[in-house]
Amino acid sequence: MDVLTTGGTLALIVGLLVAAVLIGTVGLLIMRAWTKVARADEALVVTGKSSRSDVPGSRPKQVIVNGRALVNPIRQRHEIISLRSRQVLMTVTAQSHDNVTINAEAVALVKIGSSVEDVKAASERFASQDNAVVEYTQDQLEGALRGLMAQQTVIQLMRDRQKFSDEISESISPELQTQGLLLDSFQIREITDDSGYISSLGAPEIEAKRQAAEIAATNAERAIAKERIANQEQNLIEETEYDSNQAAATSRVGQARAQAEQAEALAGEKARQEVLGQRAENRQAELDAEVKRVADADLYKQQKRADAEAYERTKAAEAEALVAESEARARLRRSEAEATAIREEGEAKAAAIRAEAEALRENQEAVLAREALAVLPQLMESFAAGYANIGSMTLIGGSGDSGASKHFDGESSVALAGVFKSVEAATGIDLGSILQAKVQGTAMGEALAESNHTGTGVDQER
């Protein structure tokens, strides 16, 4: 029994919980269905017995702006009033104060006011007809627009369009506010006519402005042309300066190039002179070597010749020695003396030859001396020719023929010595010393050769 009692209690509790959940769910669904929320640009108007009215004798009404309310669909009704701005377009045809039929196109923005009073007033007239707001506003604005157009001239309408728009807004706004409407803006977009009157009004001004524009364009073109000419002149000046600078730079470059070429030519000429100098030195060395070689060759030939002659003489002396041995003994002393003289002469000649070769090798004066000796016969011939031109000579005083000849010989010696001194002053070569040395060398060589020859004969005799 206890178990049954406990099970029944649990079933009752579960049943109660399920019923509570169901009731709660149903209640939430009902509240969800009954809750009405107005958007940011909407107003919620609730009418019914439970709604309160601020105006005595009117229907109960509740206005919620940007909020929510719980509406019982059985006892209450609700309306959603849009608070968005509505665009109203209109085209009005009327006669102006100066009897010109004109067409005016205008645009207005109108909305239901967000206050409770405006929403209540608008809901009474436009709750179920949202488009009626546009129609009502359009009718009101067109009537006001026609009335003001009849009071203004065309020129006034064209010039004071904003003032005209403001006057219409001020005149129509109170009428709209009684219906819960607010006029946000009103603008006249365009004013036209079918006869072309408006377009002709601006013809003089248009022509004047066109002329002014043409004059301004001409002045602008003139200014542009003037500026272009100034720019061209400036460009010409700059180009001239650039050409001048470029020419100067080219001139400097040419001068530098010419200087470089001149320096290069000078360097080349200097190098060529050095090469020529080196060649001259080499040639001088070759000439010195050639002179030495010639001198050595001459000396060697002379030695060989002397050896050959000595050999021949030796052979002859040996042949004669057997015959003249006795005679040689008798002339021994004389032969020895002669041999000594000949030997000394040969030694002197050899020494002269060696000195001449050494002089040729060490100094160019030897070459000049040889050349001077080569031209000495010609010089002496010229010297003798001068005296040969003398036809006769008369000598006053003296001691006869011997005195005249002695005087003439003295004059010749003095003249010849003067010639030798002139040659020595011009070339630095002492012809007298050279001739004296040559004569001495020749005598010594002959003496030496004779001595050798004599000695050879003596040996042969022995």
Image (spheres, grey):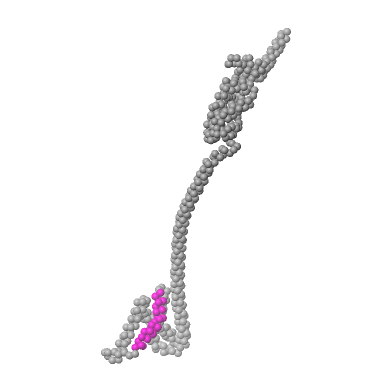
Magenta stretch: dominant secondary structure? helix
Q: Residue at x 45, y 90 (%)?
A: 323
User: What residue sits 41% from the left and 89% below the top?
Assistant: 327
Res. 230 visible in picture: yes
Residue 13 location (% of width, % of height): 69, 12
- Is residue 374 inside the magenta stretch? yes
Query: Could you say where residue 24 lies in the image, as x and y percent from the top left?
Result: 66, 16
Q: Nearer the viewer, residue 32 or 265?
A: 32
Q: Quadrant of residue 165?
A: top right
Q: Is residue 77 left or right of residue 368?
A: right
Q: Eyeballing the image, is 259 above or below 195?
A: below
* Quadrant where the N terminus is found in the figure: top right
Span highlighted in magenta in the image: 364-390
Q: Position of residue 85 (x, y in %)?
A: 59, 28
Viewer can see residue 455: no
Quadrant in which residue 408 is drawn: bottom left
User: Observer-nearest residue: 119 or 368?
Assistant: 119
At horizontal 59% and vertical 32% (from top left) the residue drawn is 94
Residue 311 on the magenta span: no
Residue 63, placed above or below residue 416: above
Q: Position of residue 42 (x, y in %)?
A: 60, 24
Asked if residue 226 lies left or right of residue 400, the reply is right
Q: Nearer the viewer, residue 436 or 453?
A: 436
Q: Outermost residue, top direction?
A: 1
Name the residue furthest front. 99
